[in-house]
Amino acid sequence: MEKFERVDVNLGDRSYPIYIGKGILEGFASFLKKHIDTRKVFIITDSRVFELYFSPIFESLHRDGISVFHAIFPEGEKHKNIKTVSALYNKLIEVKIERNEPIVALGGGVAGDVAGFVASTYLRGVPFIQIPTTLLSQVDSSVGGKTGINHRSGKNLIGTFYQPIFVFIDIDVLKTLEGRDYFSGMAEVIKYGIIRDKGLFEVLENKRDDILKRDPELLMLIIKRACEIKAGVVEEDEREKGVRSILNFGHTFGHAFEAWGGYSRFTHGEAIAIGMVAAARLSFLLGCCEKTTSERIEGIIRSYGLPADLPDISGRFLIKYLERDKKIKEGRVRLVLTEGIGCVRLRPVEVAELLGYLPRIRGCV
C-alpha cells in the first residue's frame, strides 16, 4: 500500500479524517480497524461500481475475518428515492445489521447520499463510511455530512446532516472514470478556487494539460486542497446557517438548469459550470467584480471541456423552480456572488431585479 495524505474535519465529537492516497483500496481493513471494532460490514453500491471496485474492498475485509454483506441498486439519480431506501432497510434487517456495525458507501454522489441517509436513520443511526469513486464525490459530496434523497417535487428534499466516521479516497479509481464525469468533477474543483483559493485557481489554469491527463501528483494536490477548503467551511458552519452557503456558488442557477434539462441533459457538474458562469456574469453586472474576473471564470470552465452557454430557460421557469426549492424569501433570492478570484459573498437580489438582468446574463451585454 502506498502512502497517503490526511485531512481532518474538526467537529468536536463528530470529527473525522479524510484519507487520500494512491492504490490504497486493498488496505481498507487496516484503516477501518483504526476507527471501529466490528466483525460485520454492510456495503451499499451501484451496479457499475460493484463490478469495478467491490472485490478489493471485500478481499481486504475478508482477510481480516470481517463478514461483508452488500446491496446493489441501479445506477443513476432517478434511483435516489424512498423506494430504494426502503429496499435497503429490508436488506439491513434481513442480515441483522446492529447499531455498532458500519454502513459503507462505495460509489459516487448518489451512492453516498443514499447510503448516508440510510445510515443516519436505520436504528436511529449506525456508523457510516464514505469510499467515493468519482472526482465530484471525492472533492464535494463525500465531505460535510449532507445526506439526501429526491422527491418528485425536487432534489434532496428529504435528508439529514450525518457525518461519516472517515472518508477513504483512492485516486486510482479515477483511471476508469469516463471523460464527461471527470470534467464534471473538475467543475467543483474550479468552484473551490473561485470561492476561497486564488492559488488553486491558478494551478488549474497553469497545469490544465497535466490535470486533464490525470497526473497522479496533481490529482493528489487538487483533491487534498479541495477537501481542506470544504473541511474548513464545514467546521465554521456545519449545518449551513451562514458561511457554508458559499459552497453553493453556481448552484442556485445550476440546480434550476438541471431541473430544466429533466436531470438528463446536463450532469450535475455541467449544470454547476453553467451556473457559475451565470453567477460570475451577474456579479459583474451588479458591480461586485471586474469584467476580467467574470471572463476568467468563463474561460477556465470552457478550457476544461465544460459547457458555459446558458440554456434558453425562461424567467418564469427559473422563479418557479427557485420558489419550489425554497431559494426565494420575502421576494429576494439569496445568491453567492464573486468579488474576485478567491473571494465570494452572499447577496440578496430582488426577484424583479434578477429577472431584469436575465437576458443580459444570457448574452453578457
Image: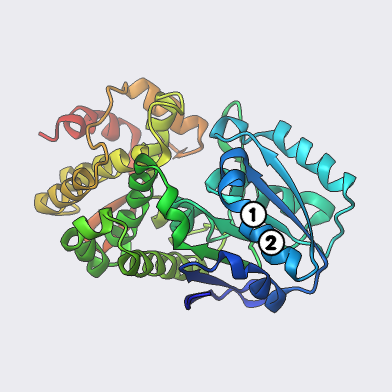
- The quadrant of the picture occupied by the C terminus is top left
Q: SS for tag 1?
A: helix
For this rendering, which residue is in front, 351 or 215?
A: 215
How many numbered markers are drawn?
2
Q: Residue at x 66, y 34 (%)?
A: 81
Asked whether the beta carbons under mark 1 and mark 2 sit within 8 Å of each other, the answer is yes
Q: Is residue 333 in sight in this rendering?
A: no
For this rendering, which residue is in front, 142 or 253?
A: 142
Q: Residue at x 34, y 56 (%)?
A: 189
Label 2, on which residue? 59
Label 1, on which residue? 55
> On residue 355, which mark appears?
none
Q: In the image, what residue type sits under mark 2?
A: Glu
Q: Residue 353 at what x, y percent from top left?
A: 27, 34
Q: Name above or below for residue 132 compared with residue 8.
A: above
Q: Crowding at label 1, few (<14), some or many (≥20) Cα neighbours within 10 Å? A: few
Horizontally, residue 2 falls left or right of residue 304, namely: right
What is the C-alpha distance between the residues marked 1 and 2? Answer: 6 Å
Horizontally, residue 82 falls left or right of residue 335, namely: right
